[in-house]
Image: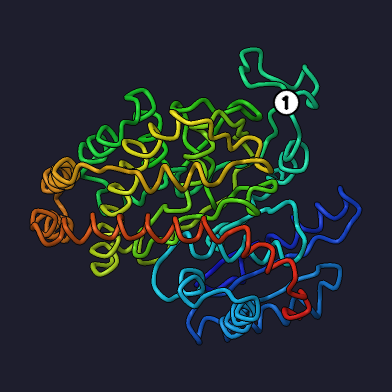
């Protein structure tokens, strides 16, 4: 599955090769689904690319879903008495990383899928490198006890009956960072270090990641590793796969931020779920706006990033401690008590002053930047109105996520009843 708001020519042709590889390995047809959220001009170009692939690569079952078909799809949920309030959390305009992921989760359910292999539209396969799906096919959905001992690291501590719900990797070419630091390069290295210290990234990893940012090269020596809680980056959502998780827990639908889809990896890592991070990277290419340090892009991005920071700390400081005091277990996903998670989210007691102070710390860090537009963002972050807007947006996003969580099993049941022929 690929979700996009940009032209797909490079990624679509590239990942057709991976789909072909998967079909040969599994001896079955693998639907290749592209969900397009681009503007009318982008969708017109993408339709011509899809048409060419359908005519010339008939062994690929490519399914292209434009904005009109997405609207028709969600309209079908009304016949199951899904409220407009819930539908508006699934199909709305504006930036939201969680929205496209939730669309992919529901559409996968419509196709009856247990496995999702997700790639971003600004990535492509690396020439002469192996496919990410090699590890995804090999380990996704298997219990630790089902993996030969010779393939397991000696220090593995996971329960043998725990199942692998996520297998993923990172990027080469744009580094494996989940944050775009282009506007701080090359002169504001200290600011990058301080921001990641604020995010509680261990100093040893900051030096490794800093090298990746500057060089644009990311490499992991080990073929794969099981992630410890805090000592490694999460798999990137542009190079990731899931087993069954999509049927039970949606991503956050929070608006106007980046990284909200990482709620899922945070939840898994902090609930002792085995996650495999492998070294079959894909090539990531930043958009021209990132490369050219477009002022509107930089201004909008740092606003979104500050919102993401507040969301991240709200999750780690207030939600995770509550979850750990309960019997909530996401590793047995089919039997997970979603109400426990909902109750923990409802009972989050945030410290608004602490959150305001953290936004001020971000402001003070980027105030040292040599880039004028970043300095301008710093001045904005000091204003009480901005900080109230950020924290209120996060609080509203959590409330919306609670609504989706409460309705998700019903939404998945409805999605399963919709005929996938709607996408033909």
The quadrant where residue 355 appears: top left
Q: Nearer the viewer, residue 287 or 236?
A: 236
Question: For numbered disc 1, what is the local secondary structure?
Answer: loop
Estimate the x, y position of residue 99 in percent, counting from the top left. 49, 64
Estimate the x, y position of residue 144 in percent, counting from the top left. 73, 26
Which of the image's four quarters has the N terminus?
bottom right
State whether residue 151 is above or below residue 109: above
Tell me the crowding category of disc 1: few under 14, some 14 to 19, or many 20 or more residues within 10 angstroms, Cα based.
few
Which residue lies at the image location 64% right of the left edge and 83% below the top edge?
Answer: 47
State whether residue 349 is above or below residue 292: above
Q: Residue furthest right?
A: 27
Estimate the x, y position of residue 374 in percent, counting from the top left. 17, 56
Which of the image's four quarters has the C terminus?
bottom right
Which residue lies at the image location 42% right of the left edge and 53% below the top edge?
Answer: 260
- State the residue position of label 1: 161
The quadrant where residue 319 appears: top left
Q: Is residue 12 left or right of residue 385?
A: right
């Amino acid at each position: 599955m690929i979700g996009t708001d940009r032209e797909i020519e490079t990624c679509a042709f590239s990942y057709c090769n991976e789909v072909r590889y998967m079909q040969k390995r599994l001896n079955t047809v693998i639907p290749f689904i592209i969900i397009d959220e681009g503007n009318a001009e982008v969708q017109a170009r993408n339709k011509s690319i899809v048409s060419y692939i359908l005519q010339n690569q008939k062994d690929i079952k490519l399914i292209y879903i434009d904005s009109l078909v997405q609207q028709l799809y969600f309209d079908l949920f009304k016949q199951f008495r899904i409220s407009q309030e819930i539908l508006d959390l699934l199909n709305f305009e504006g930036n939201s990383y969680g929205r496209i992921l939730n669309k992919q989760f529901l559409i996968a359910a419509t196709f009856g899928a247990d496995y999702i292999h997700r790639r971003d539209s600004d990535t492509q396969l690396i020439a002469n490198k192996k496919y990410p799906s090699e590890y995804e096919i090999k380990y996704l959905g298997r219990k630790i006890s089902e993996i030969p001992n010779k393939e397991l690291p000696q220090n593995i501590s996971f329960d043998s009956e725990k199942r692998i719900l996520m297998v993923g990797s990172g990027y080469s070419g744009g580094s494996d960072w989940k944050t775009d630091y282009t506007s701080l390069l090359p002169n504001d290295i200290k600011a990058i270090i301080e921001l990641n210290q604020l995010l509680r990234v261990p100093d040893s990893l900051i030096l490794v990641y800093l090298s990746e940012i500057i060089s644009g090269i990311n490499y992991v020596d080990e073929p794969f590793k099981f992630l410890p809680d805090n000592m490694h980056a999460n798999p990137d959502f542009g190079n990731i796969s899931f087993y069954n998780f999509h049927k039970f827990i949606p991503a956050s639908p929070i608006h106007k931020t980046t990284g909200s889809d990482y709620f899922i990896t945070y939840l898994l890592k902090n609930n002792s779920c085995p996650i495999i991070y492998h070294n079959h990277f894909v090539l990531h290419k930043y958009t021209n706006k990132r490369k050219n340090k477009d002022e509107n892009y930089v201004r909008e991005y740092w606003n979104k990033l500050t919102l993401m920071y507040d969301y991240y700390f709200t999750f780690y400081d207030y939600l995770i401690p509550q979850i750990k005091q309960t019997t909530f277990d996401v590793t047995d996903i089919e039997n997970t008590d979603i109400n426990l998670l909902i109750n923990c989210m409802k009972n989050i007691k945030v410290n608004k002053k602490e959150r305001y102070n953290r936004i001020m710390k971000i402001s003070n860090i980027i105030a040292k930047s040599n880039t004028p537009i970043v300095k301008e963002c710093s001045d904005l972050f000091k204003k009480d109105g901005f900080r109230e807007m950020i924290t209120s947006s996060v609080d509203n996003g959590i409330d919306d996520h609670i609504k989706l969580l409460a309705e998700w099993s019903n939404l998945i049941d409805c999605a399963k009843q919709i005929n996938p022929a709607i996408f033909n």
